[in-house]
Image: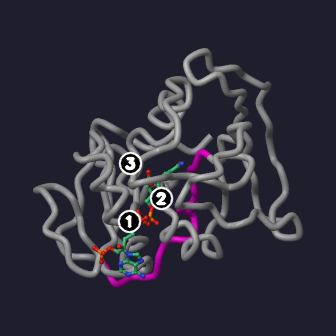
């Protein structure tokens, strides 16, 4: 399984204009309700600690790309991952890379080097929110989805439909139950057909 190197990340100061290395797998990571809801009032719809642990384990050491609103909803950079924020104008805290397009985000991600292996990271993660998922979907190699089996009627942010003519399920976990929220959930990975 591709992995990144959490302890040894540096980012090359100026963004390389070299082509994005094809071996860097672009992944979306998201938790989706059965009606595709993902957020409300710039916050998540649930607190499922096993899903948060899964997110941390999966993204650790890898570049994470997010929209400005998602960054603000978290309120701080995620540790041990290069945080790349997409915005048309945002004064980000030190250490956070701000870019103005998805293409620049991918280039920034591919410029993150591990001093251990001196290659680009194996994976980068698009981690929301709704605007960024919708724009990034066509570029993705893999969707890492937590399906949360509930319907949130009053959500204001949604994930785009996962078109079965484009995406095929590569793996599906067992079904889990979260005591705190009362929701069943499962981890599903999709790759392009
Ligand atoms: N369930 C999940 O897994 C999950 C994951 C992440 C987020 N969420 C939820 O999603 C919601 C936030 O999503 P959102 O759609 O409102 O916001 P978002 O996608 O996080 O961020 C939107 C912002 O990104 C920037 N942006 C978008 N497209 C751009 C482009 N083409 N070029 C330059 N900048 C661009 C703009 O920032 P500026 O306005 O600064 O220009 C825009 O306001 C929250 O409720 C959050 O909790 C859910």
Q: Is mark 3 within 8 Å of ligand 1?
A: no
Q: Any magenta on residue 22?
A: yes
Label 2, label 1: how many angstroms apart (C-alpha)?
Answer: 6 Å
Observer-side mark, 3 or 2, equals 2
Q: Is residue 90 above or below residue 27?
A: below
Residue designated by label 3: 117
Residue designated by label 2: 128
> Where residue 83 sits: x, y (%)?
30, 55
Q: Quadrant of the N terminus?
A: top right
Q: Are marks 2 and 1 in contact (CB under 8 Å)?
A: yes
Most distant residue in the right direction: 165
Q: Any magenta on residue 137?
A: no
| Residue occupying the point 81% across, 62% down | 167
Q: Earlier in the sequence, mark 3 or mark 2?
A: 3
Residue designated by label 1: 67
Mark identifier at residue 176: none
For ligand 1, the image quadrant comes to bottom left
Label 3, label 1: how many angstroms apart (C-alpha)?
Answer: 29 Å
Q: Depth check: 155 or 144 in front? A: 155
Q: Is mark 1 within 8 Å of ligand 1?
A: yes
Where disc 3 sits, the SS reads: loop
| Residue occupying the point 70% across, 44% down | 151
Where disc 1 sits, the SS reads: strand
Q: Earlier in the sequence, mark 3 or mark 1?
A: 1
Q: Is mark 2 within 8 Å of ligand 1?
A: yes
Label 3, label 2: how many angstroms apart (C-alpha)?
Answer: 28 Å
The total number of labels drawn is 3
Stretch in magenta: 16-31
Q: Residues within 10 Å of mark 3 (few under 14, many from 20)?
A: few
């Amino acid at each position: 399984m591709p992995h990144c190197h959490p302890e040894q990340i540096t980012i090359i100061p100026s963004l390389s204009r070299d082509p994005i290395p094809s071996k860097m797998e672009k992944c979306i990571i998201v938790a989706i309700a059965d009606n595709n809801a993902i957020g409300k009032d710039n916050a998540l719809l649930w607190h499922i600690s096993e899903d948060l642990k899964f997110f941390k384990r999966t993204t650790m050491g890898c570049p994470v790309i997010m929209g400005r609103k998602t960054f603000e909803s978290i309120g701080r950079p995620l540790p041990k991952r290069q945080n790349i924020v997409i915005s048309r104008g945002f004064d980000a805290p030190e250490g956070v890379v701000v870019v103005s397009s998805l293409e620049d985000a991918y280039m920034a991600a591919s410029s993150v080097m591990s001093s251990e292996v001196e290659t680009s990271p194996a994976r980068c993660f698009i981690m929301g929110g709704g605007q960024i998922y919708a724009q990034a979907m066509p570029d993705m190699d893999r969707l890492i989805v937590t399906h949360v089996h509930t319907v949130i009627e009053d959500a204001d942010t949604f994930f785009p439909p996962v078109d079965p003519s484009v995406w095929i399920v590569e793996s599906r976990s067992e079904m889990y139950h979260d005591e705190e929220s009362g929701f069943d959930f499962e981890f599903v990975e999709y790759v392009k057909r």
